[in-house]
């Protein structure tokens, strides 16, 4: 009897999730692009007329005039030392710091974390690695540390 109840509850739960998934509308982040086919000469002329603007921005300006809102452009932070950045990212990829910290946090939350001398030593060691990687990242990106 209990298996039938569990099965019915599971089935009901699955159907509930399916209904919820169907009811959500999937909105696109960006509208679909508009395609315009040009001859090579026309494309070259557009590039010349754009004069420093992207062709897309030039066409938007021609079509909509100055009434268009400026496009949001994500600023690219220049990397001062790409080799140092690659080294730090490699260290992060090889380390298990995130996983280990997650396990420590879980054990602390459930009350099963034994904080002995060895655990304290490992936490301080991980902290030292994180501080070192932070410093390397700040240097690689050419940033300054704020106090």
Image: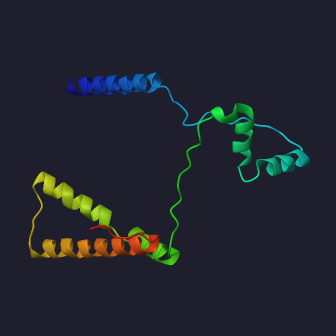
x%, y% of residue 109? 14, 52
Q: Residue at x 45, y 70 (%)?
A: 141
x%, y% of residue 126? 25, 72
- Find the residue positioned furthest to the front: 66
Q: How is the image coloured?
A: rainbow
Q: Nearer the viewer, residue 12 or 58?
A: 58
When the figure is inspected, residue 81 is found, relative to residue 77, above or below; the finding is below
Left or right: where 54 falls relative to 36: left
Left or right: where 79 falls relative to 13: right
x%, y% of residue 24? 45, 25
x%, y% of residue 63? 74, 33
* Quarter of the rendering containing residue 68: top right
Q: Quadrant of the N terminus?
A: top left
Q: Nearer the viewer, residue 113 or 52?
A: 52
How many numbered marks have been drawn onto this rendered protein structure?
0
- Residue 4: in sight, yes or no? yes
When the figure is inspected, residue 77 is found, relative to residue 125, above or below; the finding is above
Left or right: where 141 falls relative to 110: right
- Residue 91: in sight, yes or no? no
* Quarter of the rendering containing residue 56: top right
Q: Nearer the viewer, residue 87 or 80?
A: 80
Q: Quadrant of the C terminus?
A: bottom left
């Amino acid at each position: 009897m209990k298996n039938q109840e569990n099965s019915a509850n599971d089935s009901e739960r699955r159907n509930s999730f399916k209904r919820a998934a169907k009811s959500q509308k999937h909105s696109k982040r960006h509208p679909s692009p508009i395609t315009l086919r040009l001859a090579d000469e026309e494309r070259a002329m557009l590039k010349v007329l754009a004069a420093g603007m992207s062709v897309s921005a030039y066409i938007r300006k021609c079509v909509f005039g100055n009434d268009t809102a400026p496009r949001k452009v994500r600023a690219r932070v220049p990397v001062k030392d790409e080799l140092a950045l690659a080294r730090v990212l490699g260290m992060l990829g090889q380390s298990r710091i995130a996983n280990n910290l997650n396990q420590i946090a879980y054990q602390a939350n459930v009350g099963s974390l034994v904080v002995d001398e060895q655990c304290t030593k490992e936490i301080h060691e991980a902290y030292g690695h994180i501080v070192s990687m932070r410093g390397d990242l700040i240097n690689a990106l050419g940033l300054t540390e704020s106090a």
